[in-house]
Image: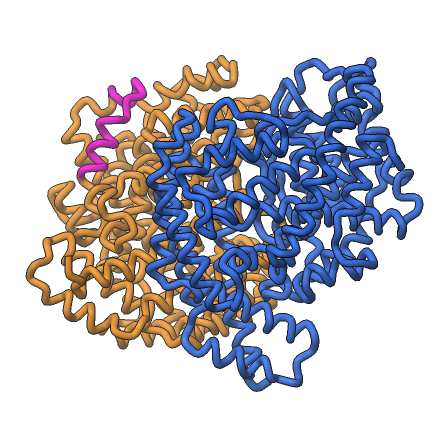
Chain colours: A blue, B orange
Amino acid sequence: MPETAYTLLERQFRRAAALGEAAAVLNWDRAAMMPKGGSGARAEQLAELHALRRDLLAQPGTDDRLAEAETDRSLDPWQRANVAEMRRMWVHATALSESLVMALTRGSAACEAIWRDARANADFAAVLPAFETVLELVREAARAKAARLGLSPYDALLDEYEPGVRAAGIDRVFALLERELPPIVAKALERQETRARPIRPEGTFPVERQRGLARRLMEALGFDFAHGRLDVSAHPFCGGVPDDIRLTTRYDESDFASGLMSTLHETGHALYEMGLPKAWRGQPVGEARSMSLHESQSLLIEMQVCRSQEFFAFLAPMLGEFFGAGGPAWMPANLHALATRVRPGFIRVDADEVTYPLHVILRHRLEQAMLAGDLRARDLPAAWTEGMTRHLGLVPPTDREGCLQDIHWFDGAWGYFPSYTLGAMTAAQLYAAARRALPDLAQEIARGRFAPLIAWLREHVHARAASVATGEIVAAATGRPLDADDFLAHLRARYLGES
Amino acid sequence: MPETAYTLLERQFRRAAALGEAAAVLNWDRAAMMPKGGSGARAEQLAELHALRRDLLAQPGTDDRLAEAETDRSLDPWQRANVAEMRRMWVHATALSESLVMALTRGSAACEAIWRDARANADFAAVLPAFETVLELVREAARAKAARLGLSPYDALLDEYEPGVRAAGIDRVFALLERELPPIVAKALERQETRARPIRPEGTFPVERQRGLARRLMEALGFDFAHGRLDVSAHPFCGGVPDDIRLTTRYDESDFASGLMSTLHETGHALYEMGLPKAWRGQPVGEARSMSLHESQSLLIEMQVCRSQEFFAFLAPMLGEFFGAGGPAWMPANLHALATRVRPGFIRVDADEVTYPLHVILRHRLEQAMLAGDLRARDLPAAWTEGMTRHLGLVPPTDREGCLQDIHWFDGAWGYFPSYTLGAMTAAQLYAAARRALPDLAQEIARGRFAPLIAWLREHVHARAASVATGEIVAAATGRPLDADDFLAHLRARYLGES
């Protein structure tokens, strides 16, 4: 077969993917296996892999090859979509000068290190100078990407995580959530007050038992241990590569529930990766579509499925088997009530699914304002407190429970927060569609039969990979573009008893 | 500081080293962690890292930069040695055309896969065609390297593992061993017959206990678990990178001794890597000097130290502690007798240290003859049987116990075998020198105090890295060039009771 621009590009991007895959395994190893003394060597290895990947994508002639492939009429739709994804990766990889990339990498690493202490000491002033540097560099990067992509600076950052999604659309739906959620929170809290307080299961839950339970549930959900592992890290995540997923979780011997829910959440991410089309491994079109769609898969499994009443009907006897426990705390209804408590709090990662979007909306507003130059870094603590008071009626006691809580901004990740809530909305809309398509779904879940749901997700989401836009996947799977209706209906049903 | 040819080369080779380090961690992961289904993706990742490393070393302009650095009078001795090592790596990386490298990689992989079944079925004919292909490709590669290095084809292959060592020197010392070893074997067997047969400790030795014992001994020897791990793989090895060593072993619950000796052997390799100079991480001059020196470090720990009477005086009470055992089988003298049994056999990797060199000499002769075209691939089984009969008085029942037993040739690794025996000789010569320098060494070892020995090795071997030739390291540490005297004296002392 003669070489074409397209086949040359396939090879170039497969090689870049192999570097990314190697880095993914090294990242997992760093979190789950590496002895402390390996961190210097590992940082160097990862930095070199990263630089090499960028060099590969930026290779001279790539632009011309892309242009030629873009007019190749012999390509099929997936190949055309592959070229479009290559173009997008190439633009993001080359939009920033090498010196800006290095300044960002160094600046973020320095700021992140200072932030760790600043957060522990609730000392925003300590991190402010480094944070100002990061903000300036991110603004410069956003402007550079904006120029290349023909977008606003914020949209240009967003585009890396959420291709095709724009701030205007996010702002509209966030404005709706900002109106609708506070009354739901208030009513849910009232309703909770009228009911018996759920009982927390007491006991010691040995790590080995928790691991056995986690593996059993992962297998039930369709996680294939011939293509993946379960290990431990400080922060649970789903890493590795589609044919070799490295899922991590954590175990607390006095509380099995939190680690278990983390495992189930990450399993949703893993099933997405495992369900990507084998024929397109190593090609841009074969990758997961977007951050929000990824988050929709983890939240669909964790929030929609595994915090439902039917799931606890399935889970409760299994908890008895693994932990030898019984009594009122272990009844399905009690466990479900525990897993769906609403409690406004300061910390995003501890938030329930009703208040979570309010945390995200606050961050989205603040990062837009900082990027636009309307909010100075030094004024962030005051703006944060003002926003928390407005959105959640809470005043953080210190900046540790306020603007210092998340790593993202200090580490240079901007434009990422909206994906969490877009993911929650997408999860609700997909799950509603799945329930329409699979009328027995709730009963199946109560019996621990997840295969029909996973098959539906595989067909409508996983197998489509990046062949079309996120919006098109959601619309084709659910019959309409993404909106907040199913998400709000889900919250009203679960937390207010409305159907 | 202005860029010079030398500083540019340092950067280029550091990047290549980072790729090699990443591959080392991925290789460890493949053997110790990876689920089966990850093998395809992993092979692709490793192949790409390998290709990228070669591309990096072969970058246009490298030759000129090397030439410029070679005349840079401002460089200190380590920097000059670094340039020499860069030149050597560059020559080996660029001596073969890319098409020959790919043909070798593919041919070896194909042959290795066929060999696995052929060995299981003792069916040499099945692997012969693929083996003939590998041999032809290796001969072509050897000729290409020979032309670049101005060496004979065999010496050119040898040079990659043993820089500066030539077949002529190996042949001389192997001829001596070939004369001296058979009478030692015969006398050792006679002497064994006159003594009570040692008793094998019976029992079940739980993996967790064996792991605990292994870790205790590794720590006693100076293995730093802040910079390394101990895991399990089918074949024990020492992988990873100097700041993050990944040592593997295996456990047999009915026999703790074999896995334990493997662990101690690999610990010797690990201590070498951990002792390489921190200031030269990622540079060619900072790497281990040669395969034989590496093997000398593992054999010094395993054979010289850990199969000595004084070591068993230290180990025996510890075995009692970990396995709760006692009685005649657990006495130091019995354990030592077990660990130093001589038994001529068919299989190299199971051989004792007296007969081991005879296995190596056979392979060295055969691979030289095959490379020279004096022995055809198809005639290997007959030549093997003839050699085993001559060297060890044994006729392999099938080719499984004969020429199919080792992976090396079928996987394209030629010129590697001599390193094992050069390593054993070097270990004996270094250990004899260490005993002269540390008169209390035997008593220290009996007390479990290894620090003085390791400090001596660090100073005289590890810390010198690749700053001078192997021969110079050995001569400086021991007072004379490498010979077989101390090795033969060691065997006569341990196995014949001569002192």
Q: Is residue A494 left or right of residue B393?
A: right
| Residue at horizontal 74 percent and vertical 54 percent from the top | A482
Quadrant location of the N terminus of chain A in the rendered image? bottom right
**B38 vs B365: above or below:** above
Is residue B447 highlighted in magenta? Answer: yes
Residue range of the region highlighted in magenta in the rendering: B443-459
Q: Is residue B144 left or right of residue A50?
A: left
The C terminus of chain A - image quarter? top right
Q: Residue at x 75, y 36 (%)?
A: A217
Of the pair A145 and A14, the residue shown nearer to us? A145
Q: Is residue B285 magenta?
A: no
Residue B374: % across, % down: 38, 74
What x and y, as percent, mark residue B378? 51, 71
Residue B269, visible in the rendered structure: no
Toward the viewer: A169 or A98? A169
Q: Viewer-proximal residue, A24 or A174? A: A174
Tag count: 0
Above or below residue B458? Residue B410 is below
From where the camera sits, is residue A442 visible? yes
Please state the horizontal and vertical placement of residue B306, each as a whole percent of the image: 35, 30
Horizontally, is B11 left or right of A436 in the view?
left
Front position in the image: A307 or A107: A107
The x and y percentages for residue B401 are 53, 53
**Relative vertical location of residue A369 with respect to residue A303 in this rendering, above or below:** below
Residue at 45% x, 31% y is B260
